[in-house]
Amino acid sequence: MKRREFLKGVAASAAGAASANATSVISDDLMNSEDAPITASHFGAVRALRRNGKFEGVLSESELDFFPISLTQGLAARTYDATRIARPCVRKGYLEKGWQSDKSMRGKDEWIEISWDEAYKLVADELKRVLKDHGASSIYGGSYGWYSVGSVNNPQTLLGRMLNIIGGYTTRKLNYSCHCISAITPHISGTDEANALQTAWPTILKNSEAVLIWGADPINTNQIAWAVPDHESYLYFAKLKEQMQKRGVKVITIDPVYNNTAKFLGSEHISINPTTDVAMMMAICYEMMAQGLADEKFLKKYTHGAEEFKAYLRGESEDGLKKDAAWASKICGVSEDEIRGLAKILGSKRTMIMCGWGPQRAHHGEQFHWMATVLAAFVGQIGLAGGGYGFGYHYSDGGCPSPAAPVGSALSLTSGAATTSSAFPGLGSMSIVPASEGEWKNRDNIAIPVSRIVDCINNPGKEIDFNCKKMTYPNIKLAYWAGGNPYMHHPDTNLLARTFEKLDTFIVQECFWTASARMA
Protein backbone atom coordinates (compact mmCIF):
# COMPACT_ATOMS: atom_id res chain seq x y z
CA MET A 1 0.00 0.00 0.00
CA LYS A 2 1.30 3.46 -0.90
CA ARG A 3 1.85 5.87 1.97
CA ARG A 4 -0.71 8.35 0.57
CA GLU A 5 -3.33 5.60 0.24
CA PHE A 6 -2.66 4.50 3.82
CA LEU A 7 -3.00 8.02 5.22
CA LYS A 8 -6.14 8.60 3.15
CA GLY A 9 -7.63 5.42 4.56
CA VAL A 10 -6.79 6.45 8.12
CA ALA A 11 -8.43 9.84 7.58
CA ALA A 12 -11.51 8.26 6.04
CA SER A 13 -11.94 5.77 8.89
CA ALA A 14 -11.68 8.58 11.44
CA ALA A 15 -14.35 10.71 9.80
CA GLY A 16 -17.80 10.36 11.35
CA ALA A 17 -21.28 10.47 9.87
CA ALA A 18 -22.58 14.01 9.68
CA SER A 19 -25.66 16.16 9.36
CA ALA A 20 -24.33 19.58 8.33
CA ASN A 21 -24.69 20.68 4.73
CA ALA A 22 -21.64 20.65 2.47
CA THR A 23 -20.09 24.06 1.99
CA SER A 24 -17.93 24.79 -1.03
CA VAL A 25 -15.40 27.57 -0.61
CA ILE A 26 -14.05 27.51 -4.12
CA SER A 27 -15.42 26.89 -7.59
CA ASP A 28 -16.26 23.24 -8.20
CA ASP A 29 -14.65 23.41 -11.62
CA LEU A 30 -11.26 23.04 -9.94
CA MET A 31 -11.81 19.36 -9.48
CA ASN A 32 -14.55 16.83 -9.00
CA SER A 33 -15.05 16.75 -5.23
CA GLU A 34 -15.31 12.97 -5.28
CA ASP A 35 -11.73 12.80 -6.53
CA ALA A 36 -10.41 15.41 -4.12
CA PRO A 37 -8.07 13.84 -1.54
CA ILE A 38 -8.91 14.06 2.14
CA THR A 39 -6.53 15.99 4.35
CA ALA A 40 -6.80 17.02 7.96
CA SER A 41 -5.61 19.53 10.53
CA HIS A 42 -6.41 20.70 14.04
CA PHE A 43 -9.30 22.59 12.43
CA GLY A 44 -10.99 19.54 10.94
CA ALA A 45 -10.95 17.20 7.94
CA VAL A 46 -11.50 18.59 4.44
CA ARG A 47 -11.15 17.65 0.80
CA ALA A 48 -8.24 19.38 -0.90
CA LEU A 49 -9.11 21.00 -4.21
CA ARG A 50 -6.30 21.22 -6.76
CA ARG A 51 -5.75 22.96 -10.08
CA ASN A 52 -2.71 22.40 -12.29
CA GLY A 53 -1.14 20.34 -9.52
CA LYS A 54 -1.48 23.10 -6.94
CA PHE A 55 -3.52 23.03 -3.73
CA GLU A 56 -5.90 25.98 -4.10
CA GLY A 57 -8.82 25.48 -1.75
CA VAL A 58 -10.78 23.20 0.54
CA LEU A 59 -14.21 21.64 0.48
CA SER A 60 -15.83 21.03 3.87
CA GLU A 61 -18.32 18.19 3.64
CA SER A 62 -20.96 16.73 5.90
CA GLU A 63 -19.35 13.29 5.66
CA LEU A 64 -16.25 14.67 7.35
CA ASP A 65 -17.47 17.31 9.76
CA PHE A 66 -20.66 17.96 11.74
CA PHE A 67 -20.00 21.70 11.93
CA PRO A 68 -17.29 22.95 9.50
CA ILE A 69 -15.47 26.06 10.70
CA SER A 70 -13.83 28.90 8.79
CA LEU A 71 -10.29 28.22 10.09
CA THR A 72 -9.85 25.53 7.41
CA GLN A 73 -9.90 28.28 4.77
CA GLY A 74 -6.33 29.19 5.68
CA LEU A 75 -4.84 25.79 4.85
CA ALA A 76 -4.18 26.45 1.16
CA ALA A 77 -2.65 29.89 1.72
CA ARG A 78 -0.43 28.57 4.50
CA THR A 79 0.98 25.85 2.26
CA TYR A 80 2.57 28.36 -0.11
CA ASP A 81 3.19 31.18 2.35
CA ALA A 82 6.45 33.12 2.18
CA THR A 83 7.27 31.92 5.70
CA ARG A 84 7.49 28.30 4.51
CA ILE A 85 11.04 26.97 4.98
CA ALA A 86 12.30 25.61 1.66
CA ARG A 87 15.59 23.94 2.64
CA PRO A 88 17.71 23.24 5.74
CA CYS A 89 19.24 26.45 7.03
CA VAL A 90 22.08 27.20 9.43
CA ARG A 91 22.99 30.47 11.07
CA LYS A 92 26.13 31.84 9.40
CA GLY A 93 28.07 32.15 12.64
CA TYR A 94 27.21 28.61 13.67
CA LEU A 95 28.22 27.25 10.26
CA GLU A 96 31.63 28.89 10.71
CA LYS A 97 32.32 28.23 14.41
CA GLY A 98 29.76 25.68 15.52
CA TRP A 99 28.73 25.67 19.17
CA GLN A 100 31.46 28.22 19.93
CA SER A 101 29.80 30.91 17.80
CA ASP A 102 28.32 34.14 19.15
CA LYS A 103 24.99 33.11 20.71
CA SER A 104 23.76 36.70 20.87
CA MET A 105 23.45 36.60 17.08
CA ARG A 106 20.52 34.21 17.25
CA GLY A 107 17.59 35.91 15.57
CA LYS A 108 19.90 38.46 13.91
CA ASP A 109 22.40 36.41 11.91
CA GLU A 110 22.29 35.59 8.21
CA TRP A 111 20.83 32.19 7.26
CA ILE A 112 22.77 29.88 4.95
CA GLU A 113 20.98 27.11 3.06
CA ILE A 114 22.71 23.73 3.11
CA SER A 115 22.01 20.26 1.71
CA TRP A 116 20.14 17.60 3.65
CA ASP A 117 23.28 15.49 3.93
CA GLU A 118 25.13 18.45 5.45
CA ALA A 119 22.26 19.03 7.87
CA TYR A 120 22.17 15.37 8.96
CA LYS A 121 25.91 15.38 9.65
CA LEU A 122 25.87 18.73 11.45
CA VAL A 123 23.11 17.62 13.83
CA ALA A 124 24.51 14.11 14.37
CA ASP A 125 28.02 15.38 15.13
CA GLU A 126 26.72 17.92 17.65
CA LEU A 127 24.54 15.35 19.41
CA LYS A 128 27.52 13.00 19.68
CA ARG A 129 29.73 15.79 21.04
CA VAL A 130 27.27 16.86 23.73
CA LEU A 131 26.53 13.26 24.74
CA LYS A 132 30.26 12.50 25.05
CA ASP A 133 31.27 15.71 26.85
CA HIS A 134 28.24 16.37 29.06
CA GLY A 135 26.04 13.27 29.17
CA ALA A 136 22.47 12.54 28.14
CA SER A 137 20.85 14.84 30.70
CA SER A 138 22.47 17.86 29.00
CA ILE A 139 20.19 17.41 25.95
CA TYR A 140 16.67 18.79 26.33
CA GLY A 141 14.23 17.10 23.98
CA GLY A 142 11.71 19.93 24.05
CA SER A 143 9.49 19.06 21.12
CA TYR A 144 6.41 20.44 22.81
CA GLY A 145 3.87 21.69 20.32
CA TRP A 146 0.83 21.18 18.15
CA TYR A 147 2.23 20.70 14.68
CA SER A 148 1.04 17.17 13.89
CA VAL A 149 -2.47 15.76 14.28
CA GLY A 150 -1.25 12.20 13.84
CA SER A 151 0.20 9.48 16.03
CA VAL A 152 2.52 7.66 13.63
CA ASN A 153 4.34 10.80 12.52
CA ASN A 154 4.02 12.84 15.71
CA PRO A 155 7.20 14.96 16.07
CA GLN A 156 7.22 14.84 19.87
CA THR A 157 7.20 11.06 19.91
CA LEU A 158 9.69 10.52 17.12
CA LEU A 159 12.23 12.96 18.56
CA GLY A 160 11.95 11.36 22.00
CA ARG A 161 12.44 7.87 20.62
CA MET A 162 15.46 8.95 18.59
CA LEU A 163 17.12 10.68 21.56
CA ASN A 164 16.43 7.64 23.74
CA ILE A 165 18.04 5.33 21.21
CA ILE A 166 21.25 7.36 20.95
CA GLY A 167 21.70 7.75 24.71
CA GLY A 168 18.81 9.44 26.49
CA TYR A 169 17.82 13.04 27.20
CA THR A 170 16.06 15.39 29.60
CA THR A 171 12.34 15.46 28.96
CA ARG A 172 9.36 17.30 30.43
CA LYS A 173 6.29 16.59 32.51
CA LEU A 174 2.83 18.14 32.12
CA ASN A 175 1.98 20.89 29.62
CA TYR A 176 1.24 24.58 29.42
CA SER A 177 -2.46 24.02 28.66
CA CYS A 178 -3.52 22.40 31.94
CA HIS A 179 -0.38 22.17 34.08
CA CYS A 180 -2.05 22.91 37.42
CA ILE A 181 -5.07 20.65 36.89
CA SER A 182 -2.96 17.68 35.89
CA ALA A 183 -0.65 18.20 38.87
CA ILE A 184 -3.27 18.64 41.61
CA THR A 185 -6.33 16.56 40.69
CA PRO A 186 -4.68 13.11 40.96
CA HIS A 187 -4.17 13.96 44.65
CA ILE A 188 -7.81 15.08 45.03
CA SER A 189 -9.94 12.70 42.99
CA GLY A 190 -7.40 10.07 41.92
CA THR A 191 -7.24 10.99 38.24
CA ASP A 192 -6.00 13.71 35.91
CA GLU A 193 -9.29 15.53 35.49
CA ALA A 194 -8.00 17.69 32.62
CA ASN A 195 -7.79 14.66 30.34
CA ALA A 196 -10.47 12.43 31.87
CA LEU A 197 -13.56 11.40 29.92
CA GLN A 198 -16.47 13.75 30.54
CA THR A 199 -20.06 12.81 31.34
CA ALA A 200 -21.60 12.18 27.91
CA TRP A 201 -23.78 14.88 26.42
CA PRO A 202 -26.88 12.66 25.98
CA THR A 203 -26.83 12.06 29.75
CA ILE A 204 -26.60 15.80 30.43
CA LEU A 205 -29.42 16.64 28.01
CA LYS A 206 -31.67 14.05 29.60
CA ASN A 207 -30.92 14.63 33.29
CA SER A 208 -29.28 17.96 34.06
CA GLU A 209 -31.55 20.71 35.37
CA ALA A 210 -28.77 23.29 35.63
CA VAL A 211 -25.47 23.70 33.80
CA LEU A 212 -22.80 26.00 35.23
CA ILE A 213 -20.13 26.96 32.66
CA TRP A 214 -17.33 28.52 34.70
CA GLY A 215 -14.20 30.02 33.14
CA ALA A 216 -14.80 28.32 29.79
CA ASP A 217 -15.88 29.36 26.31
CA PRO A 218 -16.48 26.06 24.48
CA ILE A 219 -18.23 27.62 21.49
CA ASN A 220 -14.93 29.33 20.75
CA THR A 221 -12.36 26.78 21.89
CA ASN A 222 -13.94 23.61 20.47
CA GLN A 223 -13.12 24.84 16.98
CA ILE A 224 -9.76 23.10 17.29
CA ALA A 225 -8.61 19.84 18.83
CA TRP A 226 -5.42 17.95 19.61
CA ALA A 227 -6.30 15.52 16.84
CA VAL A 228 -8.82 16.07 14.03
CA PRO A 229 -12.13 17.43 15.34
CA ASP A 230 -15.47 16.53 13.80
CA HIS A 231 -17.11 19.34 15.83
CA GLU A 232 -19.93 17.14 17.10
CA SER A 233 -20.05 19.13 20.35
CA TYR A 234 -21.66 22.04 18.49
CA LEU A 235 -24.70 19.86 17.83
CA TYR A 236 -24.98 19.17 21.55
CA PHE A 237 -24.66 22.81 22.55
CA ALA A 238 -27.47 23.55 20.10
CA LYS A 239 -29.52 20.81 21.78
CA LEU A 240 -28.70 22.29 25.19
CA LYS A 241 -30.12 25.58 23.95
CA GLU A 242 -33.28 23.72 22.93
CA GLN A 243 -33.54 22.13 26.38
CA MET A 244 -33.36 25.59 27.95
CA GLN A 245 -36.61 26.34 26.12
CA LYS A 246 -38.30 22.93 26.29
CA ARG A 247 -37.81 21.94 29.92
CA GLY A 248 -36.31 25.05 31.49
CA VAL A 249 -32.72 23.90 31.94
CA LYS A 250 -30.91 26.69 33.76
CA VAL A 251 -27.58 27.60 32.12
CA ILE A 252 -25.28 30.13 33.74
CA THR A 253 -21.88 31.26 32.41
CA ILE A 254 -19.40 32.75 34.87
CA ASP A 255 -16.63 34.67 33.17
CA PRO A 256 -15.03 38.13 33.35
CA VAL A 257 -16.41 38.80 29.85
CA TYR A 258 -19.66 38.02 28.03
CA ASN A 259 -18.19 35.27 25.90
CA ASN A 260 -19.26 33.48 22.73
CA THR A 261 -20.87 30.60 24.62
CA ALA A 262 -23.08 32.90 26.69
CA LYS A 263 -24.09 34.74 23.53
CA PHE A 264 -24.83 31.52 21.60
CA LEU A 265 -26.91 29.98 24.39
CA GLY A 266 -28.52 33.21 25.51
CA SER A 267 -27.63 32.14 29.01
CA GLU A 268 -27.47 34.14 32.19
CA HIS A 269 -24.02 35.70 32.55
CA ILE A 270 -22.25 36.53 35.81
CA SER A 271 -19.22 38.78 35.44
CA ILE A 272 -16.49 37.98 37.94
CA ASN A 273 -13.17 39.67 38.64
CA PRO A 274 -10.28 37.61 37.19
CA THR A 275 -8.55 35.14 39.59
CA THR A 276 -11.18 35.61 42.32
CA ASP A 277 -13.19 32.48 41.53
CA VAL A 278 -12.07 30.50 44.58
CA ALA A 279 -13.45 33.12 46.96
CA MET A 280 -16.82 32.98 45.21
CA MET A 281 -16.88 29.16 45.27
CA MET A 282 -16.12 29.22 49.00
CA ALA A 283 -18.97 31.62 49.57
CA ILE A 284 -21.37 29.41 47.62
CA CYS A 285 -20.36 26.49 49.85
CA TYR A 286 -20.88 28.63 52.95
CA GLU A 287 -24.31 29.80 51.80
CA MET A 288 -25.31 26.23 50.93
CA MET A 289 -24.48 25.29 54.54
CA ALA A 290 -26.39 28.29 55.85
CA GLN A 291 -29.46 27.41 53.77
CA GLY A 292 -29.30 23.72 54.69
CA LEU A 293 -28.60 22.77 51.07
CA ALA A 294 -25.15 21.17 51.39
CA ASP A 295 -25.22 17.38 51.01
CA GLU A 296 -23.88 16.43 54.43
CA LYS A 297 -24.31 12.70 53.78
CA PHE A 298 -22.15 12.88 50.66
CA LEU A 299 -19.48 14.94 52.42
CA LYS A 300 -19.33 12.48 55.31
CA LYS A 301 -19.29 9.33 53.18
CA TYR A 302 -17.18 10.32 50.20
CA THR A 303 -14.76 13.06 51.29
CA HIS A 304 -11.88 13.57 53.69
CA GLY A 305 -11.34 16.85 55.54
CA ALA A 306 -14.85 18.25 55.10
CA GLU A 307 -15.30 19.13 58.77
CA GLU A 308 -12.03 21.07 58.86
CA PHE A 309 -12.98 22.90 55.68
CA LYS A 310 -16.44 23.80 56.97
CA ALA A 311 -14.83 25.22 60.10
CA TYR A 312 -12.56 27.31 57.88
CA LEU A 313 -15.60 28.62 55.98
CA ARG A 314 -17.28 29.55 59.28
CA GLY A 315 -14.23 31.58 60.30
CA GLU A 316 -13.13 29.17 63.00
CA SER A 317 -9.54 29.17 61.74
CA GLU A 318 -6.54 31.43 62.23
CA ASP A 319 -7.79 34.17 59.90
CA GLY A 320 -11.13 34.41 61.71
CA LEU A 321 -12.92 35.36 58.49
CA LYS A 322 -16.38 34.06 57.72
CA LYS A 323 -16.37 33.12 54.02
CA ASP A 324 -19.95 34.19 53.32
CA ALA A 325 -21.47 36.05 50.38
CA ALA A 326 -20.70 39.46 51.92
CA TRP A 327 -17.02 38.55 52.28
CA ALA A 328 -16.69 37.16 48.74
CA SER A 329 -18.67 39.92 47.04
CA LYS A 330 -16.04 42.52 47.95
CA ILE A 331 -13.37 40.32 46.35
CA CYS A 332 -15.01 38.91 43.23
CA GLY A 333 -17.31 41.78 42.29
CA VAL A 334 -20.42 39.59 42.21
CA SER A 335 -23.39 40.73 44.29
CA GLU A 336 -24.35 38.96 47.51
CA ASP A 337 -27.78 38.14 46.09
CA GLU A 338 -26.25 36.46 43.03
CA ILE A 339 -23.94 34.34 45.20
CA ARG A 340 -26.82 33.26 47.46
CA GLY A 341 -28.92 32.60 44.36
CA LEU A 342 -26.25 30.29 42.96
CA ALA A 343 -26.15 28.41 46.26
CA LYS A 344 -29.91 27.86 46.03
CA ILE A 345 -29.73 26.66 42.40
CA LEU A 346 -26.87 24.26 43.01
CA GLY A 347 -28.51 22.93 46.16
CA SER A 348 -31.90 22.28 44.57
CA LYS A 349 -31.27 21.20 40.96
CA ARG A 350 -29.39 18.34 39.27
CA THR A 351 -26.34 20.39 38.28
CA MET A 352 -23.38 19.82 35.99
CA ILE A 353 -20.41 22.13 36.70
CA MET A 354 -18.26 22.66 33.59
CA CYS A 355 -14.93 24.42 34.21
CA GLY A 356 -12.35 25.53 31.66
CA TRP A 357 -8.56 25.66 31.82
CA GLY A 358 -8.01 29.42 31.64
CA PRO A 359 -8.46 30.19 35.36
CA GLN A 360 -5.62 27.84 36.38
CA ARG A 361 -3.05 29.74 34.32
CA ALA A 362 -2.13 32.01 37.18
CA HIS A 363 -0.31 31.93 40.50
CA HIS A 364 -1.90 29.30 42.74
CA GLY A 365 -3.88 28.21 39.70
CA GLU A 366 -4.40 24.72 41.12
CA GLN A 367 -6.76 26.23 43.70
CA PHE A 368 -9.51 26.84 41.11
CA HIS A 369 -10.13 23.25 40.05
CA TRP A 370 -9.47 21.89 43.52
CA MET A 371 -12.15 24.21 44.88
CA ALA A 372 -14.51 23.40 41.99
CA THR A 373 -14.26 19.74 42.98
CA VAL A 374 -15.03 20.68 46.59
CA LEU A 375 -18.03 22.72 45.42
CA ALA A 376 -19.32 19.69 43.49
CA ALA A 377 -18.89 17.62 46.65
CA PHE A 378 -21.03 20.10 48.61
CA VAL A 379 -23.70 19.73 45.91
CA GLY A 380 -23.33 15.98 46.39
CA GLN A 381 -24.20 14.81 42.88
CA ILE A 382 -20.86 13.42 41.73
CA GLY A 383 -21.64 10.09 40.09
CA LEU A 384 -25.32 10.85 39.51
CA ALA A 385 -26.64 11.11 35.94
CA GLY A 386 -26.30 14.70 34.75
CA GLY A 387 -24.62 15.86 37.96
CA GLY A 388 -21.07 16.44 39.20
CA TYR A 389 -18.32 18.23 37.35
CA GLY A 390 -16.14 18.10 34.24
CA PHE A 391 -13.06 20.04 33.22
CA GLY A 392 -12.92 19.22 29.51
CA TYR A 393 -16.13 20.21 27.76
CA HIS A 394 -14.35 23.07 26.02
CA TYR A 395 -11.58 20.90 24.58
CA SER A 396 -11.56 18.46 21.65
CA ASP A 397 -15.34 18.00 21.69
CA GLY A 398 -15.34 16.78 25.27
CA GLY A 399 -18.48 14.97 26.32
CA CYS A 400 -19.30 13.57 22.89
CA PRO A 401 -19.99 9.83 23.04
CA SER A 402 -16.79 7.82 22.57
CA PRO A 403 -16.34 4.45 20.84
CA ALA A 404 -16.44 1.41 23.07
CA ALA A 405 -13.45 -0.14 21.31
CA PRO A 406 -10.06 0.09 23.05
CA VAL A 407 -7.82 2.80 21.66
CA GLY A 408 -4.13 3.60 22.02
CA SER A 409 -1.23 5.50 20.54
CA ALA A 410 0.46 4.12 17.47
CA LEU A 411 3.79 5.07 19.05
CA SER A 412 4.48 5.86 22.67
CA LEU A 413 7.09 8.09 24.27
CA THR A 414 7.50 5.87 27.34
CA SER A 415 11.11 6.05 28.48
CA GLY A 416 12.03 4.37 31.73
CA ALA A 417 10.99 6.18 34.88
CA ALA A 418 10.39 9.43 33.01
CA THR A 419 7.08 8.99 31.24
CA THR A 420 5.73 11.97 29.33
CA SER A 421 2.47 12.30 27.46
CA SER A 422 1.86 9.75 24.76
CA ALA A 423 1.98 10.59 21.09
CA PHE A 424 -1.74 11.11 21.18
CA PRO A 425 -2.73 12.54 24.59
CA GLY A 426 -6.13 11.39 25.76
CA LEU A 427 -5.94 7.99 24.10
CA GLY A 428 -3.80 6.23 26.68
CA SER A 429 -0.16 5.19 26.47
CA MET A 430 -0.22 1.86 24.66
CA SER A 431 3.36 1.21 23.62
CA ILE A 432 4.77 -0.90 20.82
CA VAL A 433 8.02 -1.24 22.80
CA PRO A 434 7.45 -1.47 26.58
CA ALA A 435 9.72 0.69 28.73
CA SER A 436 11.37 -2.43 30.11
CA GLU A 437 12.48 -3.65 26.69
CA GLY A 438 14.15 -2.38 23.56
CA GLU A 439 17.07 -0.05 22.98
CA TRP A 440 16.32 2.17 25.99
CA LYS A 441 15.50 -0.44 28.64
CA ASN A 442 17.92 1.18 31.09
CA ARG A 443 16.87 4.77 30.47
CA ASP A 444 16.01 6.77 33.56
CA ASN A 445 15.61 10.21 32.02
CA ILE A 446 15.17 13.34 34.11
CA ALA A 447 11.77 14.96 33.52
CA ILE A 448 11.39 18.61 34.53
CA PRO A 449 8.08 20.51 34.70
CA VAL A 450 7.48 21.93 31.23
CA SER A 451 7.08 25.47 32.56
CA ARG A 452 10.46 25.35 34.34
CA ILE A 453 12.68 25.19 31.25
CA VAL A 454 13.99 28.76 31.69
CA ASP A 455 14.59 28.27 35.41
CA CYS A 456 16.38 25.00 34.65
CA ILE A 457 18.76 26.46 32.04
CA ASN A 458 19.57 29.40 34.31
CA ASN A 459 20.11 27.32 37.45
CA PRO A 460 21.83 23.99 36.75
CA GLY A 461 22.18 21.92 39.91
CA LYS A 462 19.36 23.76 41.71
CA GLU A 463 17.11 21.58 43.88
CA ILE A 464 13.38 22.28 43.64
CA ASP A 465 10.16 20.85 45.05
CA PHE A 466 7.88 19.28 42.47
CA ASN A 467 4.80 17.19 43.09
CA CYS A 468 5.73 16.23 46.65
CA LYS A 469 9.30 15.27 45.72
CA LYS A 470 12.72 16.86 45.40
CA MET A 471 14.43 17.08 42.04
CA THR A 472 17.70 18.61 40.81
CA TYR A 473 18.00 20.53 37.57
CA PRO A 474 20.41 19.10 34.96
CA ASN A 475 22.92 21.26 33.09
CA ILE A 476 21.26 21.77 29.69
CA LYS A 477 23.71 22.40 26.82
CA LEU A 478 21.55 21.60 23.80
CA ALA A 479 17.82 21.95 23.11
CA TYR A 480 16.18 20.09 20.24
CA TRP A 481 12.64 21.07 19.24
CA ALA A 482 10.46 19.44 16.58
CA GLY A 483 6.95 20.54 15.65
CA GLY A 484 6.74 23.11 18.43
CA ASN A 485 7.28 26.78 19.16
CA PRO A 486 8.45 27.60 22.72
CA TYR A 487 8.62 31.31 21.88
CA MET A 488 4.85 31.16 21.48
CA HIS A 489 4.07 28.98 24.51
CA HIS A 490 6.36 30.31 27.21
CA PRO A 491 5.78 33.64 29.00
CA ASP A 492 8.36 36.47 28.99
CA THR A 493 9.94 35.82 25.59
CA ASN A 494 12.67 38.40 26.22
CA LEU A 495 13.88 36.37 29.19
CA LEU A 496 13.51 33.19 27.11
CA ALA A 497 15.74 34.66 24.39
CA ARG A 498 18.42 35.72 26.89
CA THR A 499 18.26 32.31 28.54
CA PHE A 500 18.55 30.34 25.31
CA GLU A 501 21.76 32.27 24.54
CA LYS A 502 23.35 30.12 27.27
CA LEU A 503 22.76 26.97 25.20
CA ASP A 504 25.60 25.70 23.03
CA THR A 505 23.14 24.71 20.34
CA PHE A 506 19.43 25.14 19.62
CA ILE A 507 18.08 22.81 16.90
CA VAL A 508 14.59 23.36 15.50
CA GLN A 509 12.77 21.14 13.01
CA GLU A 510 10.02 23.24 11.50
CA CYS A 511 8.09 23.86 8.29
CA PHE A 512 7.71 27.61 8.80
CA TRP A 513 9.83 30.51 10.02
CA THR A 514 8.23 30.67 13.44
CA ALA A 515 9.72 32.78 16.23
CA SER A 516 11.53 29.70 17.54
CA ALA A 517 12.89 28.75 14.11
CA ARG A 518 14.32 32.26 13.67
CA MET A 519 16.13 31.90 17.01
CA ALA A 520 17.64 28.46 16.23
Image (cartoon, grey):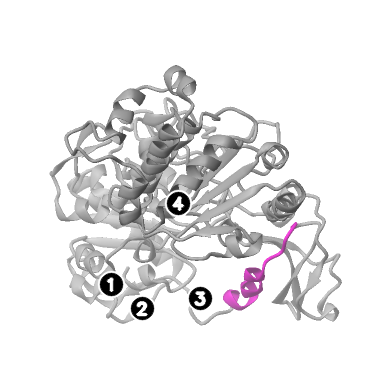
- Horizontal arrangement in the rendering, residue 232 relative to residue 71 (left or right): right
The label shown at residue 112 is 2
Disc 1 is placed on an element classified as helix
What is the C-alpha distance between the residues marked 1 and 3?
A: 22 Å
What is the C-alpha distance between the residues marked 1 and 4?
A: 67 Å
The answer to which of marks 4 and 2 sits earlier in the sequence is: 2
What is the C-alpha distance between the residues marked 2 and 3?
A: 15 Å
- The residue labelled by disc 3 is 84
Nearest the eye: 97 or 189: 189
**The disc labelled 2 sits on which kind of residue?**
Ile
- Tell me the quadrant of the picture where the C terminus can be found: bottom left
The answer to which of marks 2 and 3 sits earlier in the sequence is: 3
68 magenta-colored:
yes
Q: Residues within 10 Å of mark 4 (few under 14, many from 20)?
A: few
Q: Are marks 4 and 2 in contact (CB under 8 Å)?
A: no
Q: Residues within 10 Å of mark 3 (few under 14, many from 20)?
A: some
Q: Using the image, determine if residue 376 lies above or below residue 266.
A: above
Could you tell me how many numbered marks the image carries?
Answer: 4
Instruction: Give the quarter of the image for residue 441.
Output: top left
Nearest the eye: 166 or 216: 216
Q: Is residue 181 visible?
A: no
Q: Are marks 2 and 3 in contact (CB under 8 Å)?
A: no
The answer to which of marks 1 and 4 sits earlier in the sequence is: 1
- The residue labelled by disc 4 is 337
**The disc labelled 4 sits on which kind of residue?**
Asp
The label shown at residue 95 is 1
Disc 2 is placed on an element classified as strand
The answer to which of marks 1 and 3 sits earlier in the sequence is: 3
